[in-house]
Structures are given as structure tokens and as C-alpha cells.
Image: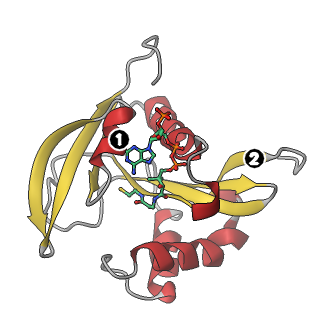
Amino acid sequence: MATLHRERIVSLRQDRDRLSALASLHQAEWGKISPFKTVAQHEEKLRFRISGPPPSETYVLLIKDELAGSVSLLQHDDIAGVRPDLSPWLASLLVVPKHRGRGYGRQLVAHCVEHAWQLGFSTLYLYTHTHPEFYIGLGWRVIEHRGVRGGNVTIMEHRYEPGKPKR
Ligand SMILES: CC(C)(COP(=O)(O)OP(=O)(O)OC[C@H]1O[C@@H](n2cnc3c(N)ncnc32)[C@H](O)[C@@H]1OP(=O)(O)O)[C@@H](O)C(=O)NCCC(=O)NCCS
């Protein structure tokens, strides 16, 4: 895609040079709570995510060609043993601080939901430690609360209904 666009969302599979920088962003945001504790481990996680079969996919948000966020679609998320019956999962939603509050998080979620729909998945799942209200505002609903790794997570689902106005 041309770099003339001010902002764009591209697959990390097509833009692998961004992988190390994205791993650093993930480490800075989640290093303390994630099972992946170093940048190298986040790199390994991302390499795994972009080498797997569908629905596994990771998208990056580029603003003026600068890495500004990400979202992943995973067959299963990394919280071992939590609802292995559910699939696929939205994960690793991130917008860098200086670009928050401008609708990019919403765009990344919508991009992931539409990608899943194209693959035939009308329902997506996620877990969040901190942001259930953000996702409720985007049309997700809480299905369960769980204690995981000494903390509480909220498990949520989203049903995509084409034709229904997007929030
Ligand atoms: C959560 C995050 C992705 C939101 O990104 P963002 O680009 O700031 O979000 P948007 O601007 O698209 O916001 C969309 C809507 O959600 C609302 N919103 C944003 N952050 C929110 C929050 N923490 N709680 C509740 N609502 C929130 C916005 O007000 C907006 O509502 P509106 O359209 O009615 O005005 C971003 O804050 C982030 O990267 N946080 C750190 C990583 C993280 O916690 N990710 C989620 C892991 S589960």
C-alpha cells in the first residue's frame, strides 16, 4: 500500500520489519502482567502469531508510516485453561499513548471483527483486566469474570451482525 495515506492498518505478515518495534511496545505495555516478560519473548510470540494458519493474524496501525498500535486475532488466547471451548479471540489491542482518544482503538477492533467475519466467524471473544467499559461501548458483552494469575479478568464476546449499525 502506498505511504501517501496518513493512516493505515496492515497485516504484520506483510510488514515483518515492524515486528521488533511492536514487540517493544507490547513489552512496555504488558511486560509486568503478561507471561511474556522480555522483548525477545514478545518477538517470539509475534512470530508465532504470524506463522500460524487462519484465523491467526496480527495487524499494525501505521500513522504517517510510524508504528502506532496493533491488534491480534488468535485461535486461542494465552490465558492457559480459560475457556478453551471459545474461539477465536481478539488480543493485544494497543494504541500508543500520543494517539489515544482519536478513534484508532475502535478502528482496530472493527478491522479485526471484520477480518474474522470474512473467515466465517460471527462471534469473537476477548479477555481484559482493565477495559470492559471500553469494549461495552463498542458493542461487546460480558460473559464471565475469572481469577487468572492472581488477578481478575473479564471475558467478553462480540456478535457481528452485518447491516446492524456499527457503534
Ligand atoms: C484501550 C485503547 C486501545 C483505546 O484506544 P483509543 O484509540 O484511545 O480508543 P478510541 O479513541 O477508539 O475510543 C473509542 C471509544 O471508547 C472510549 N474509550 C476509550 N478509552 C476508554 C476507557 N479506558 N474506558 C472506557 N471507554 C473508553 C472513547 O471515549 C470512545 O468513545 P466515543 O466514541 O463514544 O467517544 C488504548 O487506551 C490503549 O492502547 N490502552 C493500553 C492497552 C490496553 O489496555 N489495551 C486493551 C487491552 S484489553
63 lies above or below 110? below
In the rendered structure, the answer to whether residue 160 lies left or right of residue 18 reads left
Q: Is mark 1 within 8 Å of ligand 1?
A: yes
Q: Position of residue 81 (x, y in %)?
A: 13, 64
Q: Position of residue 69 (x, y in %)?
A: 59, 59
Q: At x 64% / y 61%, what residue is drawn?
A: 98
Residue at numbered disc 2: 7
- Residue 96 visible in the shown view: no
The picture quadrant where one finds residue 113 is: top left
In the rendered structure, the answer to whether residue 115 lies left or right of residue 142 reads right
How far separated are the C-alphas under marks 2 and 1?
A: 22 Å
In the rendered structure, the answer to whether residue 121 lies left or right of residue 152 reads right
Pick out the residue farthest to the top: 163
Q: At x 82% / y 46%, what residue is drawn?
A: 6
Q: Position of residue 86 (x, y in %)?
A: 20, 46
The answer to which of 87 and 96 lies nearer the viewer is 96
The answer to which of 128 and 2 lies nearer the viewer is 128
The picture quadrant where one finds residue 104 is: top right
The picture quadrant where one finds residue 107 is: top right
Q: At x 88% / y 47%, what residue is drawn?
A: 2
Q: Which class describes the residues within 10 Å of circle 1: few (<14), some (14-19), or many (20+)?
A: some
Amino acid at circle 2: Glu
Q: Position of residue 129 (x, y in %)?
A: 26, 60
Residue at numbered disc 1: 135
Amino acid at circle 1: Tyr
As drawn, the label of residue 20 is: none
The answer to which of 60 and 48 lies nearer the viewer is 60
Q: Helix or strand or loop: what does disc 1 sit on?
A: helix
Q: At x 65% / y 60%, what residue is drawn?
A: 68
The answer to which of 36 and 115 lies nearer the viewer is 36
- Residue 38 visible in the shown view: yes
